[in-house]
Amino acid sequence: MGSVNKSVGLGDTTASVESSARPTNRKRRRNRIRWSIAGVVALAVAAVGVIAVTGGSNGRAGTLLTINGVQYDFVPGMSLAYANLTGANLSGLDLHGADFGRANLTSANLSNANLSGSQMNYTTVTGTNFTGANLTMVHSWQLIGAPLALPANCFIQSPVTSPPATGGFLFGCGAWVQDRLTGFNLSGRNLTGMSLENSWLNGVNFTNANLTNVVFRGTRMDGANLAGANLTGANLTNVNSGGIIGVPTALPTGWLLLGGYLVGPGANLGGVNFTFDVSKATLTGASLVNAHLEGATLSAKDLTGVNLTGAFVSRANLTGANLTGAVLTGVTSGAIVGTPTTLPTGWHFAAGYLIGPGAILTGANLTGINLTGFDLTGADLTNANLTNANLTNANLTNVKMSGATVTGATMTGVTMTGVVAVSLVGTPASSPPGLVVLGGAFLGPGMNLTGANLAGVNLTGIDLTGANLTKVISGGVTGTPIGLPSGFTIVAGFLVGPGANLSGANLRGATLTGANMSGAILSGASLVQANLTNANLSGATLTSTNMFLATTTGINVSGAIWGNTTCPSGSNSDFATTKNCDGNL
């Protein structure tokens, strides 16, 4: 790192020495002046020595210059932020990677200097001579003023004027601009080799511009005008486009302009509705997240590494398509034409569906399909038809399959951890060990039965230990289960516990001493004369609940939701000042 040091002046330091003999005042003044001069000289020499050492400490020879009263040791990568370099002659210096943030380069001579990779944010360049300077990958922002001269193909421009009084960017000659450039007019400009990586280029006018080898990686180009532009060799990886105006004279190898989109290897086409023909496009490595490819012709396409997360590919033609390494999580398919030659690890193609971990198979007709050993972790089989399907040893961890038809399905050895399966239709030919279908749900230890309707179910011999019974509807439940989740009990045929749905439940006179009904839904329920001593109803919904003559000693109703509730005293919560029964329990 170069150093910047204030020049030492005679008035900066005073060293005084007084003898023990206490000389006269005149003699003391002469001695003081003599020692002051000597001290200043010594300090000045020391300062020069420090500068020299600092300049060479990083193994690179620096250039010592005094500019506007400040001495600098110029080396590559140094910080010149806020430096006043007005009129400085820095011609030919190697200052690559230097920081010129908010520096003043007014009338400075930087001809033939190496400034590659330097930072010039809020830098004043009024009258600066950049003739022959290397400005490759110079990152600029809010440049102030207009320079005297720039290398060929370099120019400074802002959204309003060119050259600007303030707020300009350095374009061309391999420079780097990363910012919101919405609406810039770069028509006819030569931007060869520069970087616009991650910039917002929406609506930019590139008409007839030379964009050869420009780095557009990660940019947004919605509505940009590319009429007559030359994009030979440009890097369009992860470009997000749409509504492109005009037709460029040349595009990088493998790229096409289709339907107003730049389509090619590594393109970001997330969310695009492919109403256009992509049969001739190269899509290797492209991002097609949430893209609509319904009915698209992708036959014989190389889709290696394509990200199809959340994409819709129903009715698409995948005949001979190569999907090696593609990401298919959340893909929605069905009625696919043809058969792909290769699929990602863990994925299968059957009955026109792409089947694998995280697949969206909502309402899919998988009747009679052999899914033996398939990994369907996280898939959505809601309302799917699995009639007579073979799911032996399949992995259904965290699968959603509420409303699915399981009539005659073989489910021996299926992993059901975290499955949400309620409102099922039919009964499978075989179930996983420890599970049984009753009340339209798979009942067993640890099962997620959120919202299941278990009214009238006989729980004899059923183990519901660790099951999630949140919002479970019950009533008329019979039998004695092997186990219930913590906090649950069966009272008067109802599954009573935290979060249970007890809407309209008749618990008149029930013994609910110490019962945990936190968060339960008790709307319209009858708790007349019930014993609620020490019961926990925190956060419970008690709208239109009848609690007349209930015993409520020690009851917890913090956070409960009241409304038209009949309190134990017979009063109505709506008529209380507090709009609850707190004072009538």
Image (cartoon, rainbow, N blue to C red):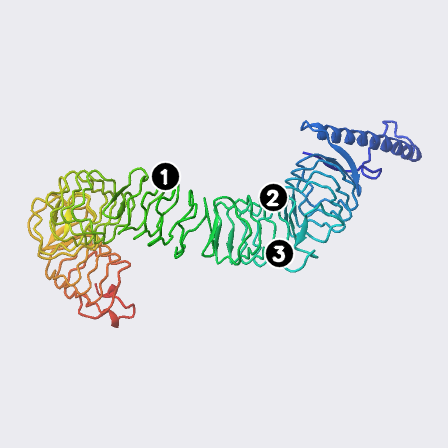
User: Residue 284: percent from the left, percent from the top?
Assistant: 42, 42
Which residue has dot 1 on it?
325
- Per the rendering, the mark at residue 145 is none
Q: Nearer the viewer, residue 390 or 581?
A: 390
Q: Nearer the viewer, residue 250 or 374?
A: 250
- Per the rendering, the mark at residue 193 is 2
User: Residue 428: percent from the left, percent from the top?
Assistant: 12, 47
- How far apart marks 3 and 2 lie (CA) works out to 16 Å
User: Residue 246: percent from the left, percent from the top?
Assistant: 53, 58
- How far apart marks 3 and 1 lie (CA) works out to 40 Å
**Amino acid bearing label 1:** Gly
- Per the rendering, the mark at residue 187 is 3
Q: Is residue 312 left or right of residue 96?
A: left
Q: Earlier in the sequence, mark 3 or mark 2?
A: 3
Q: Earlier in the sequence, mark 2 or mark 1?
A: 2
Residue neighbourhood size for the residue with mark 3, other residues' Cα within 10 Å, grouped as few (<14), some (14–19), many (≥20): some
**Dot 1 lies on which element?**
loop
Q: Is residue 359 left or right of residue 256?
A: left
**Amino acid bearing label 2:** Gly
Q: Earlier in the sequence, mark 3 or mark 1?
A: 3
- Give the quadrant of residue 185: bottom right
- Residue 16 in sight: no
User: Residue 366: percent from the left, percent from the top?
Assistant: 20, 49
